[in-house]
Every structure is written in structure tokens, then in C-alpha cells.
Amino acid sequence: MTDFTQKKFGLISLGCDKNRVDAEKLLAQIKARGCAITNDIEEAQVLIINTCSFLEASRKEAIETIIECASYKEQGGLEKIVVTGCLPQKFIGDIYEELTEADVFLGTYDYDVFFDALSRAYEDGRCNMVGEGKNPLICDRVVTTPLHYAYLKIADGCNNRCTYCLIPKIRGAYFSYPMEELVKEAEGLGEVAELILVAQDVTRYGIDLYGEKKLCEILQKLTALDNINSVRLLYCYPEMIDDTLISEIRDNKKIIKYLDIPFQHSEDRILKMMNRRGTRQSYLDLIAKLRKEIPGVAIRSTFICGFPTETEEESAALGEFLKQAELDNCGFFAYSREEDTPAYKIKGQIAAAVKNRRVKNMYAIQKSVSLKKMHSHVGKTLKVLCDGISEENGCFYGRAYFSAPDIDGNVYFNAAFAEQGKYYDVIIEDCDNYNLYGRTEDYAE
């Protein structure tokens, strides 16, 4: 039997922050087994590649990463490649015979059989154990983000059945994790300046498990923890944001006044074809209500460009919506035609060049909106969480409340001294489309 305590394990996690949490729980199991973990691929004997398969582009990235990493086998150090996550969960029938560079395949809920699968691979050769796990709730994590912030996945799967989306086919139906286990997991993260709640839809939390929405209750329990300084919400579906949640965000001092709301489009016909429940007017009404009830609230969103049959007029109307809504930041994506989704069969698919042009146009519109937002902060003093030192800019950098890690802009600032994970009052002196630039009061050139 292979002694895995003599092996070094490396991990590459692709895709979303929800995937990252899965990877961190797997690393905790590896650590609990007494195995060494390395950040250097060249040192690893076992390399785990945790994959995304949400879009064709993400599947391509995953496969290219696996093939690229196989070169380390040829150099003699790497012994086994383990492919986990969404790619094998959905596409194992397509990739197992072709992707011979990989030795072990596990799905999204198979981490409890990781060592069984790895043992089989060492003893008998390539191994497919997708679907053989029992999806145990694992609270221990090896946090891979900077130590001052962490993600907490409160639910998995999805029931929304958007016509363009593969998530229900990959992750299954929506299910919430028990509240007491989430609190235990958060407590185990240590001192956290910013805890970021994620799920495919955080606003639906608790309905399946408790028979009613429980997001506000879990927020109250998490913000009551001494080790949690603040909580940020990502992926709030617009139709699920009710008065109770709005009040909780407004009145709870530990909740960051920031919402990521994936609107996906603005035009009623397209929204209906996407199986989205909102309308242009309901979205504008929600944005207005949030700004009225939560002064200064930051709202981020994502939009799909070039959904089948989308006309030039509807694309232009989305641009007008962006100007009217004045969202703090947005991501835009060209529609990806995915087999096994209802939208795949819609007649009127749009050419890639047209989709990409529309994405570019939306970014140009949002760029001017974001620049106006950034200019409004110049001359003000903002509370900034220091994320570290920017070698490129030669100064410290961090984020104000209206910026989430990796997806929003930064605040670059000069200071006599700044420590990662601490808050600083930064005088904003300049800006660009997405970033701010400033200094602390004690800084002197």
C-alpha cells in the first residue's frame, strides 16, 4: 500500500470561488492524513487539478491545464494527476478515454473517496470514481486566499433552471448546508477581516432545509462571531431580495453594503427566454429601492450578450439600461452555446463576431459609468482594507467596501506603513475607470 505521507501534494483550482472552497476542504483532508502540501508544481508527486466546466472556454482551460501539467511527469517528479470537480462530473464519458494524461477522476461530491481513488491508481492504474462519494460536509479548510479574507459556501446546486446554464446538470438541485455547521466552519477560519458568502444563489439559503428563507438568520449568527469582522454577499438573485434582507443589510453594521445581483439582461423578451423572472422595470425598481433603503449601497451585476435571437435594438436597449441603472461595476459575457441546455436548441444563434462586438460595446458604456463613480470618490477619505503591496505600482493596495476581491477595482495608496488585513483611512487623490489612488494622512513624499 502506498504511503502517502511520503508524497507532496499540489493543487490548481480553476473557476469560481465556490470551486475554491471545495479545493480548500480537500486540502484539509490531505493535511489531516499527515501529507505535505506544496505550492510548487515541480515539487509535487501528486497534482490535483480542480476544474470548472460551466462554459466551453472553461472546459478548454481545464483540458489545456491538464495537458500542460503532464509535462512534469516526463521530467520525473510528478507521479499522478488527479482531476476533480465539474469537468469530470458532467463530461466523464467524453474525457476519460481521451484525456490519458490524468490518472484519477473525481466529481464535485467525491472528495471523501480521494485517497481510495488515489490508492487504486497507484496499485492498478487509471481510475474513475466519479459519483462514488457521499458528499460529506467537511468543515476544516486549508485557506488559499490571503489570510485576512475567506469565502464561505453556504449552499450548492441550483433550482433556477435558466435556459443557458449547465449548473443544475453539473451540481444538481439546490441544497443548503446546515446552519450550525456553517457557523462552526466560520469559527475555524480564525481572524477574518472579510468573510464572503457564496452560493449559486445565496438569497435562497435555507428554503430546502428549513422550509423558509434563512439568509438573515445565518447572517446574524455569522456576524455575532468575534473572529468575523465583516461579511460580504455575492450572487443575490433579484426576485429573492425582500424587505427583511434589505433591513438586515442596512442595520447590521458588520454586513458590507454591497450586493452582487446577476441581472443577466434588461429586456423583457430576452429575460423570458432565459427563464429569468424579472423585467426591465422590476430591476430598475429594485435598484432604486436598494439605494433608497441602504444609503451608499454598491451594486454589481453580470450580463450576457448575444443570447439567441437578441436583436441590435435589444442590445442597444441593454446599453441604455446600464446608463440608467448606473451600477458600480459589471461583467459582460458572450453567450456560450451549451449542449444539454434549452437555449442550445433555439433557432437564431448569433455569430461569435457579433456577440464579441456587443460585449465590447457594453464594456465601453460601463467604463464611462464606472469612471463617473470613481470620480465621485476623489477628494474623499475612504476606509480601505489593505490587501498587500503592489509591486507593479510600487505602493500598497486594498479595497473599499464597494469592491470585492478579484472582480472589482482596487485602491492603490502610499503610506508610511500598512499591514495586510488592517483598515486604513485613505485620502483619494486620483482615479481611473476602475481604480482609485491616494495616500494615508501620515504619508509624506
Image (cartoon, helix red, strand yellow):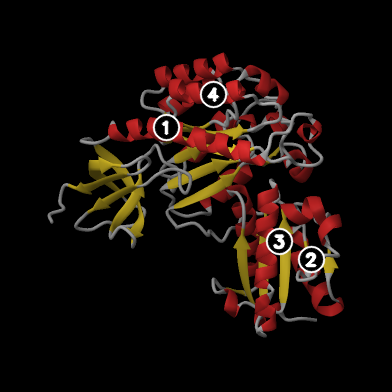
Q: Is residue 71 above or below residue 339?
A: below
Which numbered disc flags the more N-terminal residue, 2 or 1? 2
Nearer the observer: mark 1 or 3; the answer is 3
Q: Residues within 10 Å of mark 3 (few under 14, many from 20)?
A: many
Numbered mark located on residue 99 in the image:
2
Secondary structure found at label 2:
loop
**Image quarter for residue 308?**
top right
Q: Is the Cβ of the residue at disc 4 closer than 8 Å to that at disc 3?
A: no
Residue 93 rendering spot, x and y as whole percentages: 86, 56
Which of marks 4 and 1 precedes in the sequence? 4
Closer to the eye: label 4 or 3: 4
Task: Of the two numbered discs 4 and 2 on the same chain, state the one appearing first in sequence.
Answer: 2
Mark 3 and mark 2 lie on one chain; the one further toward the N terminus is 3
Q: Nearer the viewer, mark 4 or mark 2?
A: 4
Q: Real-space Cα distance between discs 3 and 2?
A: 8 Å
Q: Quadrant of residue 264?
A: top right
Secondary structure under badge 3?
A: helix
What label sits on residue 316 in the rendered view?
4
- Residue type at mark 1: give it: Asp
Q: How far is disc 2 from disc 1 in space, using C-alphas?
A: 42 Å
Q: Position of residue 162 (x, y in %)?
A: 71, 31
Q: Of the numbered discs in the image, which one, if any, rests on residue 328? A: 1
**Mark 3 belongs to which amino acid?**
Ile
- What residue is at 35 percent from the left and 41 percent from the top? 400
Residue 126 appears in view = yes
State if disc 2 and disc 3 touch (CB < 8 Å): yes
Q: Looking at the image, which residue is at 59% across and 74% down? A: 41
Of the numbered discs 1 and 3, the one sitting upstream in the chain is 3
- Left or right of 162 on screen, residue 377: left
Q: Which mark is residue 63?
A: 3
Tell me residue 405's x, y (percent): 46, 47
